[in-house]
Image (cartoon, rainbow, N blue to C red):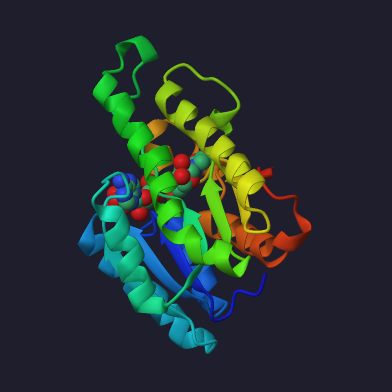
Amino acid sequence: MEIRNKGVLVTGASRGLGLELARALVREGARVVMVARNARDLDDAVRVVKDDAASSGRGGEAHGLAFDVGDKEAVHRIAGAAAALVGEIEIVVHAASTLGPLPMPLLLDTECEDFERVLAVNLVGPFRLTKALAGPMVLRQRGLVLFISSDAAVSAYAGWGSYGISKAAQDHLARSLAAELDPVRFLAIDPGEMDTTMHADAMPEADRSTLARPADVAAKIVAIIQTVESIPNGSRLGLS
Ligand SMILES: NC(=O)c1ccc[n+]([C@@H]2O[C@H](COP(=O)([O-])OP(=O)(O)OC[C@H]3O[C@@H](n4cnc5c(N)ncnc54)[C@H](OP(=O)(O)O)[C@@H]3O)[C@@H](O)[C@H]2O)c1
């Protein structure tokens, strides 16, 4: 899929993988709308990406929208504002995610409200946002929605239950949407362990030198986007 001049929405884009993906896509000439909650962090991230865009000379753009993807009321505001900023959104990357309370409790110690919040951010929010953005994709029979998954979607680890369940359901959401809306493309991508805030929050004792750099993972995802037509719709891809 050609990236240049495409309208793209990346959630979770103020740091970590989302930021590096926004940066890499803008360098390819995409017009990217970046979403995260903290407006100040997001402004800083947009500035970094815009500086890159200026030096790449490919005409990419970056814009920030400070919203919570787990907030039902935010979804149509995100979709409307994104379309006003860059026109039709043809690529969506759902990278925003929460682990829930830290340290991560065992399932029977998890408050139901905390479980609901993990599902709201990691599953229901991406579902709502996809519904809000997929109409024009279906009409034009083109577009791509990427769900950033995790190893925890397929392997069960003590303490990772809420997060893993949300990611497993998100993988199946990608498959189900692919079955219903082909040729619009839906993929789940497990990025592997990366040196990010989320990883440090989950496993503060980890040896950071063993973790992938989010920029390297973002480069692999950009290559997947560029060749997405050759990948079976609804696939779950592992990058580690
Ligand atoms: N790091 C890893 O080792 C690893 C491994 C497997 C999968 N993943 C997945 O990779 C993706 C990126 O993770 P990361 O490690 O890059 O995380 P990160 O560094 O913690 O960044 C998370 C981003 O999401 C935003 N965010 C969090 N909650 C949000 C919400 N409710 N609404 C909107 N934005 C929200 C954060 O900004 P605000 O806090 O300002 O909202 C931030 O921009 C996630 O889907 C994660 O599950 C990561």
Residue 49 vertical placement versus 93 (above, below): below
- Residue at 48% x, 28% y is 164
Q: Quadrant of residue 141?
A: bottom right
Q: Position of residue 50 (x, y in %)?
A: 39, 79
Q: Quadrant of residue 38?
A: bottom left
Which residue is outermost to the front?
Answer: 139
- Residue at 65% x, 58% y is 220
Residue 27 vertical placement versus 45 (above, below): below
Which residue is outermost to the top?
Answer: 108
Work out which quarter of the rendered image holds the C terminus and state it.
top right
Q: Position of residue 167 (x, y in %)?
A: 50, 34
Residue 140 vertical placement versus 177 (above, below): below
Q: Position of residue 219 (x, y in %)?
A: 61, 62
With 153 as the anchor, is 234 left or right in this view?
A: right
Q: Quadrant of residue 101?
A: top left
Q: Nearer the viewer, residue 230 or 53?
A: 230
Q: Is residue 238 visible?
A: no
- Residue at 44% x, 64% y is 9
With 239 as the anchor, is 83 left or right in this view?
A: left
- Residue at 29% x, 65% y is 65
Q: Nearer the viewer, residue 2 or 240?
A: 2
Which residue is outermost to the right?
Answer: 230
Work out which quarter of the rendered image holds the N terminus and state it.
bottom right
Q: Is residue 168 visible?
A: yes
Disc count in the image?
0
Q: Position of residue 159 (x, y in %)?
A: 42, 19
